[in-house]
């Protein structure tokens, strides 16, 4: 156990994976990360399901599971199948800095991702974080931020998406904001006597989304890691002089994206979801323009609709003649080739005919897709309680059969939503969480009849992965740090470092 008056520094690096910080530390002279590797710990850290910023950071802050803090994504879906924006509520679920402040510890908190409320404690100096513009806990903190030219993460993602800002320019602007945040933090840490300082860098996540599958991604990404590593190096040197400890965490990791898997298209083409007639006609028109005869299109859609409406889809399919089976095969998406002739249609949640839909996906475009069974939780249910378990098993089994375009299994694991969320009352939980193999994300926004895959757009050049990082140095005994570290371990570890008991003290990484 650390000395009673020991200080602690916590550094957050949004979307930092071990393969980047470990694999490129020497090449790019990331001295802060190198010190963690040589003198402390730098490990994989398991994220939440799905591995998303609004889900994982609140878990890091509170030690609570998503089912407890109420964040399942950026959005939740309500009874009417409508998306509702979610925000982490630090008044309802106490973050570790407020728990420390309540015990008399003076805390500095700079831009915690997804924490948008100012602390009510006088013991917390705070600047709120992404995705909203920063708010400052006092005039003194505001004044200091202006002195160092810091006003939060640059709001340039729209420009990146629209092409009015290049990835190269974005990288430079992100580096500038990271450096100004670091200099502001150094100033405040040096000037004030904080027991705990938490500084969170979110720009790494943004630049990776727009660059990781580019050949020259290092040119854009590594300057950001150099900036945060330089700050980590400064913090470690200061901590050594003070006899303090340092923790470095990320909410999840990142990976280059090869293809998007059209999960809603698979559900529609497999007969589990039904689109509205107007949308079907629009899709028909698109395929007719692509050279398919009207008779072929009509027959395929007629067969597909019969399958959708049949409660005995397998039996009906078995009775079809071989020629019809071939057409149905195309109509229900068993042909997985994404040839140049693929046609895509953008679809929305309100494009589904819910009275004819058994299962649907919504909300998340991520390496972990979410599927809801259309049961009595919704306003237009189409599944009885007695049918639900069988349907979930059927969908899971069929998903496991899907292959990538190079013949590998697409789905690596399927989690049962009832088991993961444990019947939470805070949101309508998905029934299945579908984890995809490396390089793939689940897409809910696009539909295609003749392929289940599409190229990622610029903003999906990189995306999340299940493992982030956990690093520590100082008064932590390396031998006592457990393997298999999770985001659930962070808050209990921080509180136990200061000798404070919490609900999940047994999850602490120190004795």
Image (cartoon, grey):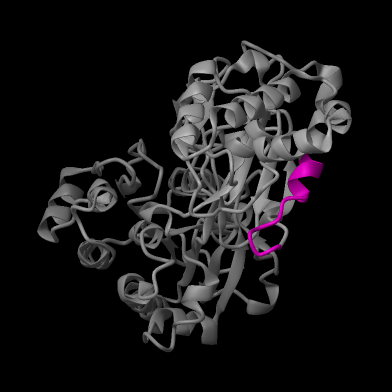
Please indicate whether residue 55 sits to the left or right of residue 314 in the image. Answer: left
Residue located at (53% from left, 24% from top): 280
- Residue 239, percent across and down? 41, 75
Residue at the image position 67 percent from the left and 17 percent from the top? 356
**Which residues lie in the magenta part?**
396-407
Report the side of 57 relative to 180 (left or right): right
- Residue at screen point 71% across, 25% down: 303
Residue 260 in the image: state x and y as whole percent: 53, 51
Check if residue 258 falls in the magenta segment.
no
Residue nearest the observer in this picture, 243 or 23: 23
Count of marks, rendered view? 0
The C terminus: image quadrant? bottom right
Does the rendering let one see residue 359?
no
10 over 232 or under it: above or below: above
Q: Which of 496 and 403 is in front in this view?
A: 403
Q: Where is residue 302 in the image (x, y as percent from the top left)?
A: 67, 22
Q: Can residue 205 be seen in this view?
A: yes
Q: In which quarter of the image is the N terminus?
A: bottom right
The residue positioned 47% from the left and 65% from the top of the image is: 16
């Amino acid at each position: 156990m650390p000395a009673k008056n020991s200080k602690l520094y916590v550094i957050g690096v949004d979307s930092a994976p071990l393969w980047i910080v470990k694999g490129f530390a020497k090449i790019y002279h990331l001295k802060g990360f190198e010190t963690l590797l040589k003198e402390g710990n730098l490990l994989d850290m398991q994220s939440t399901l799905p591995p998303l910023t609004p889900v994982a950071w609140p878990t890091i802050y509170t030690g609570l599971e998503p089912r407890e803090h109420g964040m399942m994504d950026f959005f939740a879906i309500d009874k009417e199948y409508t998306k509702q924006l979610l925000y982490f509520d630090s008044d309802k679920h106490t973050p570790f800095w407020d728990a420390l402040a309540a015990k008399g510890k003076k805390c500095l908190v700079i831009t915690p991702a997804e924490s948008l409320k100012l602390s009510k404690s006088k013991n917390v100096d705070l600047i709120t974080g992404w995705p909203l513009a920063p708010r400052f806990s006092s005039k003194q903190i505001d004044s200091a931020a202006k002195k160092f030219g810091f006003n939060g993460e640059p709001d340039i993602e729209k420009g990146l998406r629209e092409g009015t800002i290049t990835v190269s320019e974005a990288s430079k602007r992100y580096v500038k904001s990271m450096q100004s945040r670091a200099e502001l933090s150094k100033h405040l840490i040096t000037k004030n006597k904080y027991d705990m300082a938490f500084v969170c860098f979110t720009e790494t996540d943004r630049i990776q989304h727009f660059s990781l599958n580019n050949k020259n991604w290092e040119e854009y990404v590594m300057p950001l890691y150099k900036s945060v590593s330089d700050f980590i190096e400064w913090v470690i040197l200061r901590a050594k002089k003070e006899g303090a400890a340092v923790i470095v965490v990320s909410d999840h990791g990142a990976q280059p994206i090869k293809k998007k898997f059209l999960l809603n298209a698979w559900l529609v083409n497999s007969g589990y979801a039904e689109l509205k007639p107007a949308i079907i006609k629009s899709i028909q028109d698109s395929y007719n323009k692509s050279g398919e005869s009207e008779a072929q299109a009509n027959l395929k859609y007629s067969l597909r609709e019969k399958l959708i409406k049949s409660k005995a889809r397998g039996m009906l399919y078995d009775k079809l003649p071989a020629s019809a089976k071939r057409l149905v095969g195309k109509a229900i998406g068993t042909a997985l080739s994404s040839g140049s002739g693929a046609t895509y249609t953008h679809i929305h949640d309100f494009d589904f005919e819910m009275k004819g839909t058994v299962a649907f996906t919504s909300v998340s475009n991520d390496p972990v897709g979410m599927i809801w069974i259309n049961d009595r939780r919704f306003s237009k249910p189409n599944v009885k309680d007695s049918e639900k378990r069988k349907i979930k098993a059927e969908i899971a089994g069929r998903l496991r059969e899907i292959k990538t375009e190079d013949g590998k299994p697409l789905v690596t694991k399927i989690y049962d939503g009832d088991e993961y969320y444990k019947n939470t009352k805070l949101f309508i939980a998905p029934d299945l969480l579908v984890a995809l193999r490396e390089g793939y994300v689940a897409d809910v926004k696009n539909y295609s009849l003749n392929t289940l895959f599409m190229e990622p757009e610029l903003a999906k050049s990189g995306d999340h992965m299940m493992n982030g990082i956990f690093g520590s140095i100082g008064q932590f005994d390396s031998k006592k740090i457990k393997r298999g570290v999770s985001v659930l371990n962070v808050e209990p570890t921080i509180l136990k470092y200061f000798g404070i008991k919490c609900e999940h003290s047994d999850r602490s990484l120190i004795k």
